[in-house]
Image: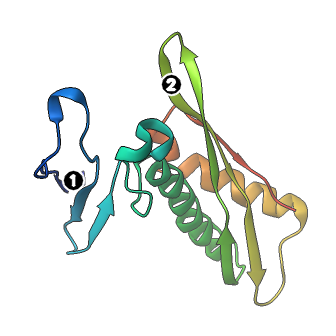
Amino acid sequence: MARYTADILWTLKAGEDFGNGRYSRAHILSFDGGITVPASASPHVVGKWADRAAVDPEEMLVAALSNCHMLTFLHKARLAGFSVAAYADHAEGIMEEIAPGRLGLTKVWLTPVITWSGPAPTPGQLADLHHAAHEECYIANSVKTEVLVVTA
């Protein structure tokens, strides 16, 4: 079993009005490897109280799904005897109402573009590699969100 941690720090700034919701949602995320990331609520959720330059939870979930799929895909491709030279993905998620008054990230599209060094898999082999990666991806196994892999 592995354990993962993140530290979050938010502080009310001088002049902000917490009781009336007039406060910045900007905060700091720190991870065990030492990296610190500026974070915020999504501007789609809190408007001007968000830090548009910071990462928001919804973006982090989309990125985590893409990142996990890529890492698992690279492993599966290597085991299948293929050599990947580059992997790029523009991942996108949508937020929708899942019940009255409740929103959720319901669908994430992964659109990987892979450059091979050496023979490339057939379209069927590529689909099988993506399916195997999705089935084994820890993050995809942890969410209800529908994850679709769209390849050219």
| Secondary element at image label 2 | strand
Instruction: Tell which circle, 2 or 1, labels the residue nearer the N-terminal end.
Output: 1
Figure coloring: rainbow
Q: How far, Cα to Cα, is label 2 from label 1?
A: 28 Å
The amino acid type of the residue labelled 2 equals Leu
Q: Bin the neighbour count of mark 1 within 10 Å (Cα to Cα): few under 14, some 14-19, many 20 and up.
A: few
Q: Which residue is situated farthest in the top direction here?
A: 100
Q: Which of 131 and 44 is in front in this view?
A: 44
Q: In the rendered view, would you say 10 is above or below 18?
A: below
- The image shows residue 116 at horizontal and vertical percentages of 77, 83
Residue identified by numbered label 2: 103
Please name the residue shown 46% across and 46% down the image. Answer: 43
Please name the residue shown 44% across and 42% down the image. Answer: 47
- The image shows residue 141 at horizontal and vertical percentages of 49, 41
Q: Which of 87 and 13 is in front in this view?
A: 13
Q: Left or right: 117 with respect to 30?
A: right
- The image shows residue 140 at horizontal and vertical percentages of 52, 45
Q: Which image quarter holds the C terminus?
A: bottom right
Q: Residue 3 carries which label?
A: 1
Q: Residue 90 occupies which quadrant of the picture?
A: bottom right
The amino acid type of the residue labelled 1 equals Arg
Q: Nearer the viewer, residue 92 or 22?
A: 22
Please name the residue shown 24% across and 59% down the image. Answer: 29
